[in-house]
Amino acid sequence: MKKLLFSIITIMFLLIAVIGCGGQGKQSVSKQKEIPSIPHEIDNSMVCADCHKEGKNKAPVTKHLDRPNCTQCH
Ligand code: HEC
Ligand code: HEC
């Protein structure tokens, strides 16, 4: 009897986990824009704006250089 109760609880937990993740996945696709990951190497001495302000070295220009911590998102 104890074993049965344990399996039921385990199954419930797994179901909740699966449903929860599914919902989150849908939301991030429909509501949030995808954040592009950095395709090149970075180090602490880099100034991102050097290239990303005017598109130097064919870097994609971004309008949000005012955001302080680039790697917080990227
Ligand atoms: C020396 C110039 C240079 C510097 C400095 C630089 N980048 Fe880049 N970045 C590029 C180039 C060129 C690309 C184009 C993709 C590639 O590498 O082929 C790029 C691409 C990107 C992309 C992908 C954009 C997209 O639309 O996919 C992100 C995000 C990015 N850089 C973030 C950063 C961050 C954050 C920093 C600072 C830590 C930084 N970059 C510093 C040159 C630079
Ligand atoms: C709050 C999160 C956040 C921060 C901080 C941030 N970015 Fe972004 N970045 C994004 C998102 C989201 C996108 C996708 C395009 C968009 O919605 O603007 C993006 C896109 C980009 C791109 C692709 C070109 C474009 O604008 O679409 C580059 C290059 C880039 N970011 C560079 C940077 C640099 C350099 C910094 C630091 C000065 C930075 N990002 C800080 C969220 C962020």
Image (spheres, rainbow, N blue to C red):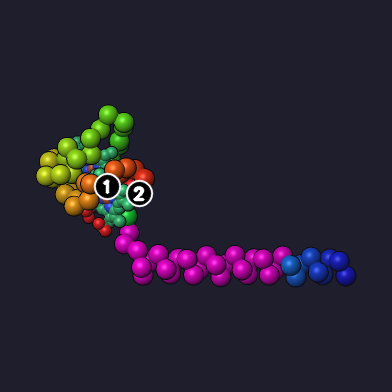
Three-letter code, disc 1 = Arg
Q: Residue at x 59, y 65 (%)?
A: 17
The region drawn magenta spans 10-34
**Residue 8 located left or right of residue 73:** right
Q: Residue at x 30, y 35 (%)?
A: 42
Looking at the picture, how far across and down is residue 71, in whole percent?
A: 34, 43
Give whichever of discs 1 and 2 has the lower sequence position.
1
Q: Residue at x 36, y 45 (%)?
A: 72
Q: Toward the viewer: 47 or 41?
A: 47
Looking at the picture, how far across and down is residue 2, in whole percent?
A: 86, 66
Q: Is mark 1 within 8 Å of ligand 2?
A: yes
Pair 1/2: label in front:
1
What residue would you read off at disc 2?
Answer: 73
Q: With respect to residue 1, does 56 lie above or below?
A: above
Can you tell which mark lies on residue 34? none
What residue would you read off at disc 1?
Answer: 67
Crowd rating for badge 2 (residues with CA inside 10 Å; few <14, some 14–19, many 20+): few
Q: Toward the viewer: 24 or 66?
A: 66
* The residue positioned farthest toward the top in the image shown: 45
